[in-house]
Amino acid sequence: MDLAGGGLKALLMGRRFLVVAVLALGLGGLLAGWELSRVGVHQGYAPAQPIAFPHKVHAGDNKIPCLYCHYAARTSRHAGIPPASVCMNCHTLLEKQTVEIEKLKEAVQEQRPIKWIKVHNLPDFVYFNHSQHVLSGVACQRCHGAVEQMDRVQQMSPLTMGWCLECHREHAHIATADFQRVMQDMTHRPVPVAGLDCTSCHY
Amino acid sequence: MNRDGAAKISCKGPKESLVRIGEPPVYWKSAEELQNGARPLGEFPGGLPGNSPSQQTEDTRRDFLAMMGFTFAAAGLAGCRAPVQNAVPLLTGSDEIVPGVSNFYATTCGGCPSACSLLVKQRDGRPIKIEGNDRSSLFGGTCATGQATVLSLYDGERLHGPLWKGQPVQWPVIDGQVRDALRAADKDKRPIVLLSGTITSPSTLHIIGEWKKRYPSFRHVVYDAVSLSAMRAANAASFGRAAIPHYLFDKARMIVGLEADFLGTWLSPVEFARQYASSRKPEGNFSTHVQFESGFSVTGSNADIRVPVAPSEMGAVALALLRRIGRYAGVTDVPDSTESFADSKKLDAIAEALWRHRGESLIVSGVQDLSVQMAVNALNSWLGNIGKTVDLARPSYQRAGDDAAMAELVEQMNRGEIHTLLLHGVNPAYDYAEPERFTQGLEKVALSISFSDRRDETSSRAHAICPDHHFLESWGDAEPVDSHFSLAQPLIAPLFNTRATAENLLAWLGIESGHHTFLRSFWRENIFPRQNERPDFESFWDRSLQDGVVVVPQKTAAPPVNAFHGDWKTAAHAIVNEPGRADDRYQLHFYESVALRDGRHANNPWLQELPDPISKVTWGNYAAVSPKLARKLGLSEGDVVSLKTEKGQMQIPVFLQPGQHEKSISVALGYGRKQVGKAGQDVGANAFPLRRQSTVNVTLEKTGRTVKLASTQRHFYMEGRPIILESTLKQVRMESAAAESGEALPSLWPEYPQGEHSWGLGIDLTACIGCSACVIACQAENNIPVVGKDQVQRIRAMHWIRVDRYYTGPEDCPASVHQPMMCQHCGHAPCETVCPVHATTTSSEGINQQVYNRCIGTRYCANNCPYKVRRFNWYNYTENAKFDFNMNSPLGRMVLNPDVVVRSRGVMEKCNLCVQRIQLAKNLALQGKRTLADGDIKTACQQACPTQAIVFGDLKDAHSRVAQLHRSQRQYKVLEELGTRPNVAYLKKIRNTTET
C-alpha cells in the first residue's frame, strides 16, 4: 500500500506529469474555445431540398444569370426563391424530363407551394439587405461561393460578424474631406459606402 | 427660476438647473408635486424605475444555479444545430408583391366617422402600419386611434363567421332567413329599421336609399353614442339646414371653445389640429385661443387662456359673450345673466378681440343643448363668421346622429312595433343612456341582425350576427366634407369568413353583383360626371384609387344656406331660466377619452396603454376632481368613490386634476365594457348610463376602498430641471435678432468621427398639441410591446416616445405645455460612457445606437440618462402567457414590422430615430441612382403628427428644414448645460397673451 501510494504520489508530483497535465488542459481549453466559437456557425450546411435543384446545370452549364430567377435581390432585402411560375417559364417549353422536374410540374398542377429549405440563415437581430449589396456591385459569389458549380447548394461562408466586417472595412470609404464631398456631388451618384456603424445591420 | 409661473425666456447656464428641494417648482407634473415641492431622488414615490420589486421574489439562489446549469446545457445542445427553416415562395409570382418590399395603398380610416384619408403600408400581403395621406386637402397625419386601428384587424376576438342564434352557420342560411323575414315584414307593412352610426359613405347611403324604394316600411336611424344632434337642430332653426358645418380654424384669428375638445376628440380632430397649428406660427399669423371648459381637455391645454367653468354654466358663458357682441352689433335686448364664472374685464377683452376679428373669429361649442348652440349660432353670425370660418354651404357629414329619432325608435321597439332591426356600427346596449330600455325593446323585435365584428353587449342579444369586414379588408368610400371624396380599398383578403355590411345590404336587396362592382358603378354615375379633369372613367377611377382622395365641384343643386333667422331670444331666456342647478351638489361632465373615444376600440391594448394626454393615466378611467375639492372632502388619488345621480350610481377611483372646475367631476366614457375581448373587458367603469340631456347633478361618497391608478404621470421624472422653455408672442417679436448665441461647453470627450449625414430632430413645442398620435405610431413602427396595467404601475411602460405634460401657474387654473420626449441622440451621451460592453455608441451619422445583441442588461445606461428615455425588457413580452396581448398570439404578431427585431428579455431599448426608415431611404436612393433629399425620410412620429410639430432630417444639410429649426431663434436643447450635445432641438412654446 505504502509503496503503491508512494509511487502514485511520486507520479503525481513528477515534473513530467505536471507538464503533460498542463499541456492537456491547455489543448483541451483551446479545443473547447474553438468549438464554442463555432456555435451557431453553419459553414458547410447543405440540406437536401424537396426538389434536387442543380444550380450547376442552370447557372453553370446554361449560364442563366443569378438575377433572372432571384429577381427580388435587386429591390428587396430578400433575394427570394423564385415562384414556381418562373421555373415554368422555361420548363413548359423544354422537353427534357427527369424525376425532379416531374416533382416541380406536379406541384404546379396541384397548386401546392414548394417547401424549400433555407440554407443561409442569419439571426433575427441582423438586418441584411440583398439589394443594397447587389446594387453596390458585390458579386453574388463573394458571399455564396461558386454556386454555379454546386449540385446542391451549401453555405460556403461562415456568415459571422467578423467575416462581414472584413469586407465592410475594406469598402468603408467615407467622404470626409471637402474635396471628396464636392466630387461626390459632381457625379450625382452616391458612392456606395459600406457602413461600419452598428445600426448598419442591427436594429 | 421665477416663481410666478410667468413666461421666462432664457434659462441657460448651470445656475438655473439647480432646484431647491422642497420649493414649489415652476413646471410641475401633478398636484402632489406642486404641494410637496421637488423631491430628491430617494424620496421618489414608488421608487426609481427598476427598483420596484419583481413579480417573482421567491426564487432562491439554488434555483438560479439550477436554471443556469440547465441554460448552459440547453444552449450547448441547441447551438449545435439550428432548426430547419423553410422558405415557401408563391406558386405564381405577383407584379406587386415582392417579398420584403413594402407597398403603400391609399384608403380611408374606419376608426371613427371623421373618415380621415390614409396611406397604409402593406408588407408581404398584410397591412402593418397606418400613415396619414398627404394628398388629402383636409387631413394630414393621423390620430392615436387611427394609428391603432391596424391592430384591431388582428384582434383574435373577431368572429370567424356568421352566427344564427349563437350557432355558426353558412352565409346562405342567414341570407335565407333574412329574406324571409323581410318579405314577411313587407307584406304586413311592419317597420324595418337600419340603426347605424354615422355613415359617411355616399355609396352606402345610396344603397340605403334603394332599400327605402324597395321596402316602403324601411327607415334609417342614425345613432351616435356621442352625438352632435343639438347642433344640427340649432342649425336647422338658425339657417334652414340641419347640418354640421365645416369649420375652418385656419382662417380664424380668434378662437373661442365652449366645452369642445376639437383637438382631441370632437368632430374631426386630425383636420382641426392641422388647421389650428397652421394658424399659430410665431413667425407668421398667430391666432388667440380661449377655452371655457369644466374638465381639462387636450384643447384646453393648448389654449392661450383657459377658463374653468361648471358644465351648467356653459349657457351663461355663451350669453355673456352674446350680450357683449350684441352691444357691438347694435342688439341691446340680450337678457342679463350670472357672470360669476369669470371676471367681467376678461370677458370684455375676449368680446373686444372677437369683434376686432369679426369674420376671422370662430366660436365652437360641444354642449349638447339646443339653447347654447342657438346662442353660439347667433354669436357666429353677428360676428360675420358664417361662410368664412363656419362653412354651412359645404357641410361636414362626419356626425349625423339624431337623438330624437333614436329615442322614438326605442319607444317603438318597446311597443313591439319593429319587425326587423339591422344594427350597424352601434352598441346601444352598452352606450345608450338607458341601456335596459333598449335591451328590453330588442327582445320584442321579430328579427334583429347585428353587423358587429364580435360578440358585444348588443350583438350577443341579437338573433344573428353577420360580422362586417375590418375597414382594411373592404372596399368603400367616404365624403367627410361635402364634395371631398375619399376612396377605401382592401389591403388584405378577409382574414375570416366575414362580409362587408354594404355587401349584405346589396345581397338582401337581390343585387348579387358584389360591393366592388356596385361601388365602381356608383362612382361612374355619380362622382365621375361631376369632374372634368379626366375624360374616361377608367383613368379617373385608377387615379382616384391611387391618390385616395378626390375633390369635385359642388353640386349645383345644393340647398341654400339662409341668413341667420334663429330665435336666439327664446334660447337666451331658456339659458337664464335653466333649472336643475343645485348648489350643494356637484356636476358630472362626460367626455370621450383621446384613446378609446366612445369605447368601440376598448379591446385594443395599444390604446388601453396609451397614457391620457392630460392625466397620463392608462388602463382605466377615473373621476377627475379638483385638488381643492379633494382636500375639502379628504380624498386622495385612487380613493374609490360612489357617484350617485338620479339615474343611478357608479364606483370609480378619484384622480386629482389641476385645472378641473371645483364644482365639476369629469368621467371618461368608453370604459367598463362587459363584452369586448380580454384586453378591454371590465377595464374602468361605464359612465354612459348616467348621462342625461341636461346637467347631471351628482353626490360623491367615499367607499373606503383604494386602488392604484396606472399613471405614468411621475414616471421618468426629471427632477424639476429647466426642460421646458416658453415665451409669449410679444416677447418673441421683440427679441427678434437679439437671440442668444449658445456657445458650446468645453468637453473632455473626444469628438466622434463624422459621416456623410448627421441626423437630428426639431420639435416645435408651440405646434405640439399633445394628442399622442406619435406614441402609437412609434409603437406600431418599432414593435413595442404592451406590458399591462401591473407593469405600468411598476414604471415599466415601454413607449420609446412619451409626451410629457407640464403644468405651470396656479393649481386651480394652470397653463400647460406638452413635450414629446425621446432619446436625444447626444453627441456626448452619458449612457455610452457607462456601458461596460459598448452596447450603446454614437454612429458616424449622429445616432445613438442601441445594439440589442450586445446588451447584457446592466441598466447602467438608463440610470445615467438625464432624459430618462431608455426602456428595459424586464420580461419576454412575446409568446409569454403572462403578457396576453397581441404579441402572445400568431394572429396578433402579424402586425409586427419585419424590419425591426423583436427584443428579448434582459436588453435595453430606446428610440433609434427609425433607423430602419433611414436605411430604407438610402437603399431607395441607391436604386433610383440619386442622392438623399430633405424630406425623403420621415420618422414614424413625424409622419403621424397632424400639426407637423416634429421634423427629422440631416443637420449637415444647411438647407434642410431640421437644420433651419436648429438655427431658429426659439431653439434650445434640453439640459444642454450637462454638455450632452443633443441632436434634438426644441422650439420654445409660445403663448399669445397679447390679445387679451
Image: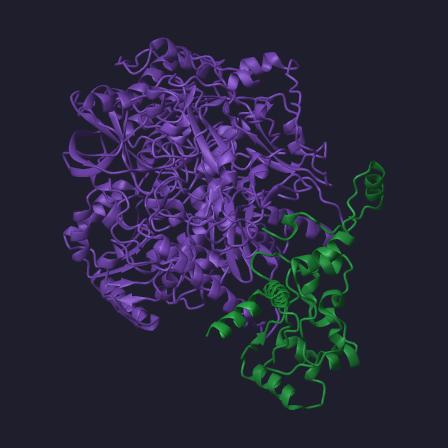
Chain colours: A green, B purple
Give the left or right position of residue B233, taking residue B746 as reference.
Answer: left
Position of residue B379 relative to residue B431, above or below, is above
Foreground pick, A38 / B215? A38
Residue at 26% in and 22% down: B662
Residue A150 showing in the rendered view: yes
Foreground pick, A174 / B697? A174
Foreground pick, B100 / B902? B902
Q: Position of residue B285 (x, y in %)?
A: 57, 22
Q: Position of residue B172 (x, y in %)?
A: 33, 72
Position of residue B356 relative to residue A26, above or below, is above
Residue at 42% in and 61% down: B891
Residue B469 showing in the rendered view: no
Q: Quadrant of residue B693?
A: top left
Q: Position of residue B47 (x, y in %)?
A: 37, 34
Residue at 72% in and 31% down: B958
Q: Position of residue A104 (x, y in %)?
A: 61, 83
Disc tally is 0
Give the left or right position of residue A75, taking residue B198 as reference.
Answer: right
Quarter in which the C terminus of chain B is drawn:
top left
Residue at 15% in and 21% down: B584
Q: Quadrant of residue B315?
A: top left
Q: Outermost residue, front direction? A: A2
